[in-house]
Image (spheres, rainbow, N blue to C red):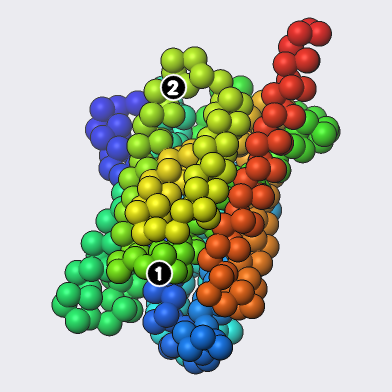
Amino acid sequence: MKETNKKQLVITSIALYFTYFIHGIGASIMGQYKPELAAAWGAGTLSDGTLDVSMVVLVIAALGLGRLISLPFSGPLSDKFGRRLSGIIGIVCYVAYFMGIAFSPSMKIAYAFAILGGVANSFLDTCVSPTCMEIYTNNPSVANLFTKFSMCVSQFLLKFFIGFVAAQHMSFRTIFIVAGAAILIDGILILFLPFPDRNTASGEKKEKTKIKITPVSLAAILIGFTSSSTFMLWLNCNQELGRAYGMADPSSIQSYYALGTAVAILSTAFFIRKGLKEINVLIIYPLISTIMLALCYLIQAPVICLIGGFVIGFAGAGGVLQLAVSTTAEFFPDNKGTATSMVMIASSIANYTIISLAGYITKVGGSGAPRMILLLNMGVTFVGILLALFVKIKRDKTTVSA
């Protein structure tokens, strides 16, 4: 590869990582503006006099539905017609999502745009991750981790963006519009930037091997469900918990969460390089999350929300889903793409079903809903520990018998 071409591909990777920077905003922005969006969509008030934000939680859940609808074909499209096309589709859908959510007059219209946002996520997944791994062939896992790191940076900065918009007395729609415009400009760049040649000769042969899902591999796939539930429930419901515990500025939780995630990505990569097994991380991190969620339930004080934000960001969102993908791929060495899809589909089901359930709890639970959602999160996360223990025990037995 020529030196100039290498430099151009580095620019391509930066442009692709920027889409994930914007994706980080898109994944959490609705959770930060629940009251404003609920008011714009004509929400009523609850029995305690507060605005009913449950419809916004349900719209957030539609992001998972959009991913679920598009994941089965976004990967094959990327493999057959190229990464660039997949990325452009994702960017166009994200522009529609940001503008649509900002100006939707009702929940139903917003729901449709949220589905588009989930579609955008799927197509970016099947463009950005494989392309960056194909650019940085010497360190593909590190290249993939930086997609998550890009999201962490934007989610950490989001609080400051929200603060600036509020200080300038701008509309809450400002960040939606700016994010939509930014990813559109980035998409125009991606349209013309070079993409790496995909070498199918380097070991990926198209021999049709049957995929056999065993109880152990199914358990590994289901960790995609439980791990996603942990951080999605926290990410989208921590604002109400902060308010219930008397926080003056619950948006601060988001910054601690993003900081914890960023620290986790760097430290987890270090620990794994030093010999820590991925399956052990899948046990230890959810255990830490479960303990932290229990503390958040028991200690009703503002400071516990900030500590919880950092710890859940670290142990819940700091690469657990990505490690679930790599663990599952070990069971399907000839079908790694399919393994990735299965885990991400489990993740999308979690996004839709668990967040929808959280929306229902928010609607019927009144002022006690945030703590009820903590209990739900604890239960699902604990199931994730059991699944990881099952995978570890079965794999250890297989290794010993071999």
Q: Is residue 121 visible?
A: yes
Classify 364 as above or below 210. below
Q: Is residue 133 left or right of residue 115?
A: left
- In the image, residue 162 sits, relative to residue 136, either above or below, namely below
| Residue 85 location (% of width, % of height) | 49, 55
Task: Give me the residue at 67% from left, 32% from top.
Answer: 388
Closer-to-camera residue (358/85): 358
The quarter holding residue 55 reads bottom right
Residue where numbered disc 2 is placed: 271
Q: Residue at x 58, y 84 (%)?
A: 108
Under circle 2, the secondary element is helix
Q: Badge 1: how crowded within 10 Å, few (<14), some, or many (20+)?
A: some
Label 1 sits on residue: 243
Label 1 residue SS = helix
Q: Is residue 358 left or right of residue 147?
A: right
Q: What is the quadrant of residue 339 in the picture?
A: top right
The location of residue 309, given as percent across then percent down, is: 40, 51
Amino acid on which disc 2 is placed? Phe
Relative to 371, is 205 on the left or the right? Answer: right
